Image (cartoon, grey):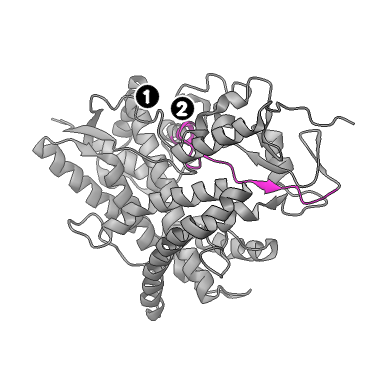
């Protein structure tokens, strides 16, 4: 029987201490040396294995004869997002049965037909972003694109979901402070979840760290509850996501707590991942002269005016689409894996190797995307390797910015994406750029 043979550290204590410290300072993601060439499985703890091969995704997360929904999600990990702060289930922590029900409801809300209806709203928000950039360009000031993208994305997501603007791109918006604090909250959740596997640390978290996280969660939840109250008081919406989540023709509808948790997840986690991709794409395109030249040529030759940048039109830009896909690989919005547990005590087979029951298994995205066994020249930003697939918000923002301005990274920003700290999500540092209006005379 081909039992698993992987790297086992000689000094487990030293190994665990190093992992803990790296989680604490946010550099664990860079330990891709755990996965040398032709070694797609690495033991990082006595009962935890990391994988980077495509086959592992199917074996761990895909349905099998014994496990319809893949291996069981790690309760200790996911609990620190919602269960330990809220007694209500969410799509993050729901049972397999409820998770399937919630996914069916969400599929309707996020269908192409439903999202296409929101094109005018997204365009309007991007108009506000471009106005901000125009003012900065005219004043000759540098711009922190991370902050502006943050306000833009969260404003779009809130309006898409609740049908209510947060006016985040308006000076002195009352919502700007808590929106800016969401990435830190998510990072704290990831950090605590990752360390919860260690029993001694879990005890410390329960008594000291968890109350602080719970208070922050309840603060966000109270804001969302008020927003949901306002939205539900409006009998006829404009086709926002809440409309599709609540106006069901069949099936069990979302309970009120499920709806509030759903709104919080979509606005917080959904916005943060989209924000990472937009910021990463913005940096990566500007950091590679050949790439920015090709992207600008494609955008400016395709559109005579900004009004031409419709849903259908921006999705025809093949090179921009390839840039988006490559940004998903190089600057993956989720920096850590979501662990699963082998619950069958008789064990399972993963990547042709026998894994005993009780083992935690996980796909490590960053290591997988930077592995020579998966990608040629993984350290480079090479859009040509992809076919065009991406979402409208990301494309329209890049189209509008690069059509309107010549954008240059401020000196010192050349390595913006390197050595950033990561706690499940990226801890994005300011991305400072200079903007120059395009002269079309």
Q: Position of residue 423 (x, y in %)?
A: 47, 42
Residue at image position (33%, 21%) is 289
Identify whether 368 is placed above or below 309.
above
Q: Position of residue 144 (x, y in %)?
A: 24, 39
Residue at image position (65%, 52%) is 74
First along the sequence among labels 2 and 1: 1
Residue 321, by quadrant, is top left
Q: Give the extent of the magenta segment.
A: 324-345
Answer with left or right where residue 320 lies relative to residue 388: left
Q: Which residue is mark 2?
A: 383
Q: Secondary structure at mark 1?
A: helix
Q: Which is nearer the eye, 79 or 399?
A: 79
Residue at image position (35%, 48%) is 310
Q: How far apart in space, not on screen, are marks 2 and 1 (Cα)?
A: 8 Å
Q: 10 Å neighbourhood of mark 2: few (<14), some, or many (≥20)?
A: many
| Residue 291: mark | 1
Q: 10 Å neighbourhood of mark 1: few (<14), some, or many (≥20)?
A: many
| Residue 166: mark | none
């Amino acid at each position: 029987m081909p039992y698993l043979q992987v790297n086992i550290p000689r000094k487990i204590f030293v190994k665990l201490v190093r992992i803990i410290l790296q989680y604490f300072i946010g550099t664990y993601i860079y330990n891709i040396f755990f996965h040398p060439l032709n070694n797609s499985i690495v033991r990082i703890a006595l009962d935890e294995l990391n994988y980077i091969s495509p086959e592992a995704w199917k074996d761990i997360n895909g349905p099998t004869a014994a496990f319809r929904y893949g291996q069981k999600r790690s309760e200790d990990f996911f609990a620190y997002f919602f269960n330990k702060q809220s007694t209500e289930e969410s799509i993050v922590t729901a049972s397999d049965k409820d998770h399937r029900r919630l996914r069916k409801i969400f599929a309707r809300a996020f269908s192409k037909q439903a999202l296409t209806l929101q094109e005018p709203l997204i365009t309007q928000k991007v108009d506000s972003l471009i106005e901000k950039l125009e003012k900065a360009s005219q004043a000759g000031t540098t711009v922190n694109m991370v902050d502006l993208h943050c306000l833009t994305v969260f404003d779009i997501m809130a309006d898409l979901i609740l049908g209510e603007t947060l006016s985040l791109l308006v000076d002195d918006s009352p919502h700007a402070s808590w929106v800016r604090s969401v990435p830190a909250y998510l990072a704290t959740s990831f950090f605590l979840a990752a360390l919860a596997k260690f029993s001694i640390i879990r005890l410390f978290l329960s008594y000291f760290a968890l109350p602080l996280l719970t208070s922050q969660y309840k603060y966000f939840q109270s804001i969302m509850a008020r927003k949901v109250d306002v939205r539900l008081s409006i009998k006829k919406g404009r086709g926002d996501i809440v409309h599709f989540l609540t106006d069901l023709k069949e099936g069990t509808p979302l309970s009120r707590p499920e709806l509030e948790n759903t709104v919080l997840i979509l606005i917080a986690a959904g916005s943060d991942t989209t924000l990472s991709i937009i910021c990463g794409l913005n940096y990566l395109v500007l950091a590679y002269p050949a790439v920015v030249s090709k992207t600008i040529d494609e955008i400016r030759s395709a559109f005579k005016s900004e009004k031409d940048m419709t849903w259908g039109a921006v999705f025809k830009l093949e090179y921009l689409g390839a840039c988006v896909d490559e940004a998903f690989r190089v600057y993956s919005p989720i920096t850590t894996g979501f662990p699963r547990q082998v619950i069958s005590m008789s064990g399972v087979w993963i990547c042709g190797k026998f894994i005993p029951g009780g083992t935690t298994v996980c796909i490590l995205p960053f290591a997988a995307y930077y592995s020579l066994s998966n990608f040629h020249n993984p350290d480079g930003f090479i859009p040509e390797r992809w076919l065009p697939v991406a979402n409208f918000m990301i494309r329209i923002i890049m189209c509008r910015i690069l059509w309107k301005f010549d954008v240059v990274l401020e000196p010192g920003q050349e390595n913006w994406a390197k050595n950033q700290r990561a706690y499940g999500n990226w801890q994005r540092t300011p991305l400072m750029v200079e903007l120059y209006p395009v002269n079309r005379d």
